[in-house]
Amino acid sequence: MDCRETAERLALYVYGDLRADDAVAVAEHLARCASCAAEHERIENARQGLDAFSPIEAPADVAAIARWAHSLEHMPRGASARRSVWIGFAAGIAAFFALFIPGARFERSTEGWSFSLGVGARESAVPPDRAALDEEVKLRVDRALERVEELQRAWLVAQDERFSDVLTTLRIESEHQRFVDSLHTQELVDGLVQAVAIPSPRPYRP
Amino acid sequence: MDNDTRDLVLRARAGDHAALERLLRRIDARVLHLAHRLLCDAEDARDVRQWVLLKVARSVSAFCGDATFETWLHRIVINACRDRRRERSAARRAVEKAELSAPLPATAVGPHSDAERHELCARVIAAVAALPADEREVVVLRHYEGLRFPKIAEILGTAETTLKSRFQRALERLAHSIPAHDAPGIHGGLDDGLSRNG
């Protein structure tokens, strides 16, 4: 092996990446060539000098990153948004009965909300519990608005320049679907706002 | 990939949040150090690390296992670092180039004190940063990650012979820019070189 062939192999030789026969040939050449031996020493020094590139410390935010990723992954998608629309629709029907059917009750208990027509209570028609209903509707509107804001924040994050690749590489259609879902959620909000604006019930005329 | 990591990947893919967090903790330092050595900038490396962890967290469910998790992770980090480099402004690159082109002091000393170690570290970072990006990638993967050339070729999608040529050129540049020092533990006789091969 001559000087040129040796010089082309020194880095691989220093890192142990040569085949055994090549390594022996390089070693033999280095033993008899002072110039190549000097070059070998410089490469070896560079190899050891690289170890001085000391590592830096990682910030302690792994848990926050995991939570953030988890929350983004579990934001409402198509199915859950559609379910929300149906829940809103059902709430609207219940509100209709509660407001226009005398005796119909919309009550809250430890087991959640319940609805009854109040059979036998016509003579003493109980006015609908408008305050409780308003409270529930307001709660749902607030929740829906929060969800819309959350989706809008996520959308803005995805559009951020620094996260442009998130948008590209993490399924752009997924982000788009979430935005479309947020529009569905906005429809739900609109529906609930209209539900709040239902006029006062007509007096009962048996 | 060891069995623990494989198990964490499988559980994270199935939606186990605790496993995902443990997986991120396990790769955290490696991602940061790899990014730091590829970018030679601590601030950029921290940004890339955060981005990569987020990407891993969100993409692990889509990781199909046609490559090993390690290869997949290396590719993500390398691509993120390439993107990061592209994002740097031309002005910043010009400043860096001017700083890095300044010749290193010829009188190197051994890293006997913290200050000297810090100085040597800065010199080595400057020398690594001065490498062309493609050569730096090979050096980082071979020297710091300890990967063999077939694996590096798989990660970078480049022929082994090309990578070996780049590696040789990079080491020649580094031999020129990293001064020899007399730190304890420095060795490198012919026998050492021979015993590492074959």
Image (cartoon, rainbow, N blue to C red):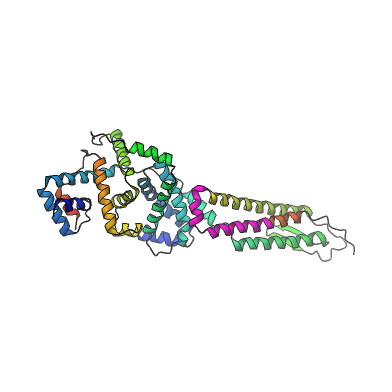
Residue at 39% x, 37% y: name it.
B95
In the visual, does A69 lie left or right of A80?
A: left
Counting from the top left corner in percent of width and height, residue A126 is at 83, 58
Quarter of the image with the N terminus of chain B in it:
bottom left
Question: Does A179 lie within the magenta span?
Answer: yes
The residue range painted magenta reads A160-187
| Mark count | 0
Q: Residue B104: where, in percent of width, then height? A: 28, 36
**Is A1 within the magenta?**
no
Answer with left or right where residue B196 lies relative to residue A169: left
Q: Is residue A67 visible?
A: no
Q: Residue furthest left?
A: A32
Query: What residue is rendered at 67% in x and 55% in y?
Result: A186
Q: Position of residue B117 (x, y in %)?
A: 29, 37
For the residue pair B138 and A106, the one nearer the viewer reads as B138
Residue A185 appears in view: yes
**Residue A161 locus on image (x, y percent):** 51, 48
The structure residue drawn at horizontal position 48% and vertical position 57%, both measured from the top left corner, is A169
Quadrant the C terminus of chain B occupies: bottom left
Q: Residue A41 versus residue A102: which sits nearer the camera? A: A41
* B43 vs B30, nearest the viewer: B43
Q: Residue at the bottom extreme?
A: A119
What's the magenta bit mostly, secondary-structure-wise?
Answer: helix
Q: Is residue B91 left or right of residue A47?
A: right
